[in-house]
Image (cartoon, rainbow, N blue to C red):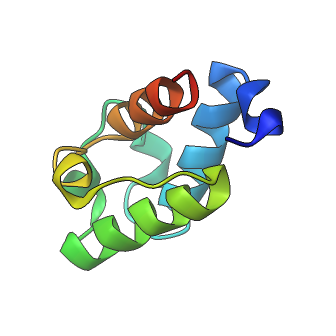
Amino acid sequence: MNSELAKSTREDIEEKVQKIVLGHISKDVEKFNNSSKLLEHGADSLDAVEIIMAAEEEFGIEIPDEDAQKMETVGQIVEYIIKKTNN
């Protein structure tokens, strides 16, 4: 695990994940928050895969497909990354 990532705060992780997500969607950005479902903001299944891949690269982790399929919101992605980096 990346030692820099271990020092990241929840807010740092949220900000990075939001930037990744917003880089892949463009609808209703002003209404976007951590509990918004990605699909509600124009993300399709390909976007979801690209978002997960970008998060894996950004945080230096691997997210198995079965876990990725359960992630529908930024908040769920953030929680997963926090749990993954605390193990």
Q: Residue at x 56, y 21 (%)?
A: 86
Instruction: Give x and y (percent) for residue 62.
Output: 45, 55
Residue located farthest toward the bottom when viewing the structure as drawn: 46
Q: Residue at x 57, y 30 (%)?
A: 85
Residue in the foreground of this view, choosing between 84 and 28: 84
Residue 62 visible in rendering: yes
Residue in the foreground of this view, choosing between 77 and 2: 2
Instruction: Give x and y (percent) for residue 6.
Output: 72, 27
Residue in the foreground of this view, choosing between 19 and 5: 5
Q: Residue at x 52, y 26 (%)?
A: 82
Q: How many marks?
A: 0
Residue 26 visible in rendering: no
Location of residue 60 (image quadrant): bottom right
Instruction: Give x and y (percent) for residue 3.
Output: 80, 35
Left or right: 72 with respect to 14?
left
Left or right: 15 with respect to 82?
right
Quadrant showing the N terminus: top right
Placement of 52 over or under 36, stated as above or below: below
Placement of 70 over or under 19, stated as above or below: above
Placement of 11 over or under 56, stated as above or below: above
